[in-house]
Amino acid sequence: MTAQKVVSLSEYRQDTQQMHIDDVSAQAFLFLQEQAQELDLPMRKLLKEHLLGIACVVKAVEGLDEAQNWLAIISDEISATGHH
């Protein structure tokens, strides 16, 4: 056998967790999109306010440095995906 068919438990858990995270994120986006349409709100502004709200919660709970770290990681991810 050349292909390895054994998957480690930690890899399986990480893959499963990521699948759930992706699913919840997609559902949240669809909810925001639906609400924006129903209330005739600009989606771009709604998303910006939502992201700002999340950053403010992280700042309040974990501190300014952690909020800035999250935003830097997001910025790096966006920059990296822009080159593909």
Image (cartoon, grey):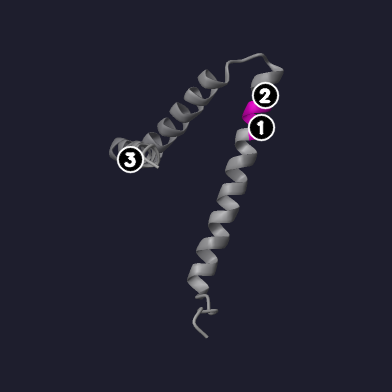
Up-down: is 1 above or below 42?
A: below
Q: Quadrant of residue 63?
A: top left
Nearest to N terminus: mark 3 or mark 2: 2
Tag in front: 3 or 2:
3
Residue 75: percent from the left, percent from the top?
Answer: 35, 36
The amino acid on which the numbered mark 2 sits, given as a three-letter code, is Gln
Residue 28: percent from the left, percent from the top?
Answer: 61, 37
The amino acid on which the numbered mark 1 sits, given as a three-letter code, is Phe
Label annotation for residue 76: 3
Q: CA distance from mark 3 to mark 1?
A: 26 Å
Which structural element holds mark 1? helix
Q: Is residue 12 left or right of residue 39?
A: left
Label annotation for residue 47: none
Q: Are marks 1 and 2 in contact (CB under 8 Å)?
A: yes
Q: Is residue 19 left or right of residue 83?
A: right
Residue 44: percent from the left, percent from the top?
Answer: 52, 21
Which structural element holds mark 3? helix
Label annotation for residue 31: 1
The amino acid on which the numbered mark 3 sits, given as a three-letter code, is Asp
Residue depicted at x 62% and y 47%: 23
Membership of 51 in magenta stretch: no
Q: Which residues are magenta?
A: 30-34
Q: Which residue is situated farthest in the right direction here?
A: 38
Q: Is the magenta region chiefly helix, strand or loop?
A: helix
Membership of 32 in magenta stretch: yes
Up-down: is 52 above or below 71?
A: above
